[in-house]
Image (spheres, rainbow, N blue to C red):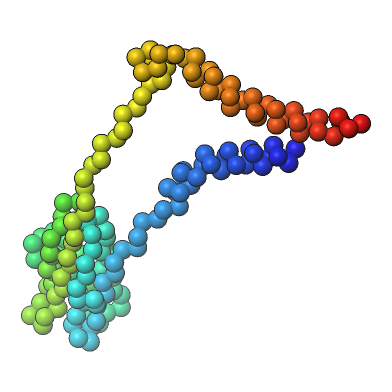
Amino acid sequence: MRWGIIASILVVSTCLTGTLGQALQTQEDPITITVDSTNFRFDPPSVTISEGETVRFIWSGELLPHNAVDKGGAFDSGEPSRNVDYSFTFEIGMNGTYEYVCEPHEDMGMAGIITVDAVNTTVEEPEPVINLSSEENNPAGPLTAVVAIMFTLIPVACLALFEKYRGRARD
């Protein structure tokens, strides 16, 4: 009985491995940029990310209001505020350099740079699927599939019978 349970667990875990692996992958946390109010600077002043990644501008309880605005117009955190939590995702195709400023304090040098690296977007062609039940690809036709199923089921049935009657043959 134990072998049957172990075999079942192995089969189920093998089938679920790919699904669980994909589900457990998490997206990276966004790069966070804050404000250094005493020096009127963004912290860090320069970041490098890849296409598809997110940058988060966050500050709260600041004495003076701030914002983050790209000079080219790609993003804008809105009107200057003392409390900001703004995120922007650089989509595929947005690689390049983005210079941004805090509009009220631009003259004081409050600026930053985001460098977005391109992501390799080459698409690999999938391998062709061969239909073994067609006469063209498999002259034996569906018979091959039946034989394959039988070679799989016979050992499983033998294992089940062995487990069921294992102790009775000695009596």
Residue visible at 18% across and 82% down in the picture: 40
Q: Position of residue 133 (x, y in %)?
A: 42, 17
Question: Which quarter of the figure is the N terminus placed in?
Answer: top right
On the image, which quarter does residue 76 sit in? bottom left
Identify which residue is drawn at 52% across, 39% down.
15
140 relative position to 65: left or right: right
143 to 168, vertically: above or below: above
Q: Write the residue at 11% across / 80% down.
A: 109
As rendered, which of 163 and 33 lies closer to the eye?
A: 163
The residue at the far bottom in this view is 38
Residue extending farthest to the right is: 171
Tell me the quarter of the picture where residue 147 sits.
top right
149 over 33 or under it: above or below: above
Please indicate, yes or no, whether residue 79 appears anywhere in the rendered image: no
- x, y (%) of residue 33? 26, 72
Residue 45 locus on image (x, y percent): 19, 76
Where's the C terminus, which quadrant? top right
User: Which of the 4 image quadrants contains residue 124?
Assistant: top left
- The residue nearer to you, when weighing 52 against 130, is 130
Looking at this view, is 12 or 162 the one in front? 162
The answer to whether any part of residue 141 appears in the image is yes
Left of 125 or right of it: where is 16?
Answer: right
Residue shown at the point (41%, 53%) measured from the top left: 25
